Amino acid sequence: MKKLAEVTGFPCVPAEDLIEATSDCGAYVMVHGALKRLAVKMSKICNDLRLLSSGPRAGLNEINLPELQAGSSIMPAKVNPVVPEVVNQVCFKVIGNDTTVTMAAEAGQLQLNVMEPVIGQAMFESVHILTNACYNLLEKCINGITANKEVCEGYVYNSIGIVTYLNPFIGHHNGDIVGKICAETGKSVREVVLERGLLTEAELDDIFSVQNLMHPAYKAKRYTDESEQ
């Protein structure tokens, strides 16, 4: 084991319980489980990037991904989310490898674990392709993302749902009224709140500031449920 540590450069040590280690491949399952968790989180991130960049007119269009190819084979001028799609597929492969490792570890009998070769192959493959996927996602996608500020602001200020954010300031009952007026007239929450004199322009600017939206700091309530009754 000391020689193995010298050759690999890793702090290799014997298992604490050699009998248990001979009978069980659970350590491999645990290690690859961490790789699977990383794959699940990376795939979720890529799903979000694909959705946020959808459009530009019939999708969310909140962000722009770097253009890595000359349009789409179906639609000219379309920017395909090629890197997130590739990383999705890498993650699917790793998740599949996790099932392989799980079943191979389960297939052992007594002190004989004859399925370890496929465990080793799956683990090394998962580490290799996940590493490449991480670097490519960072270098060829994430580092080049730009935000469509006007689109994002439009979603925030035109959403009726943000009236919930005003409940501590205008009360739930008033918030319900504002939401219904917005739905019926197409007006924004900001417009209706100002028209009804519930808050001032300065107060709304403060409440809906980027800093406050990202790090909510609820101030003293101007209204309570009791005061509305």
Image (cartoon, rainbow, N blue to C red):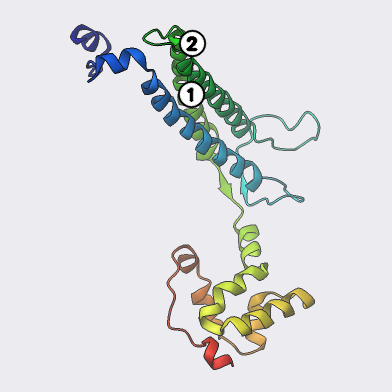
Badge 2 vs badge 1, beta-carbon distance below 8 Å = no
Residue at the disc numbered 1: 132
Q: Relative to residue 126, is residue 169 depicted above or below?
A: below
Q: Nearer the viewer, residue 177 or 95?
A: 95
Residue 156 location (% of width, % of height) = 61, 65
Q: Give how far across and how far down residue 170 sits, in percent.
A: 56, 84
Residue 19 in view here: yes
N-term-proximal mark, 2 vs 1: 2
Q: Is mark 2 on a helix, strand or loop?
A: helix
Image point 55% across, 72% down: which residue? 165
**Quadrant including the C terminus:** bottom right
Left or right for 69, reference 186:
left
Is disc 1 placed on a helix, strand or loop?
Answer: helix
| Residue 9 seen in the current view | no
The type of residue carrying mark 2 is: Val
- Side of 26 where 84 appears, left or right: right
Residue 124 image-quadrant placement = top left
Circle 2 residue:
118
Give above or below for 94 relative to 158: above
> In the rendered image of this protein, does residue 151 appear above or below residue 109?
below
* Image position of 189 (left or right of 98): right
Task: Say which amino acid is labelled 1.
Answer: Asn
Q: How far apart are marks 2 and 1 (CA)?
A: 21 Å
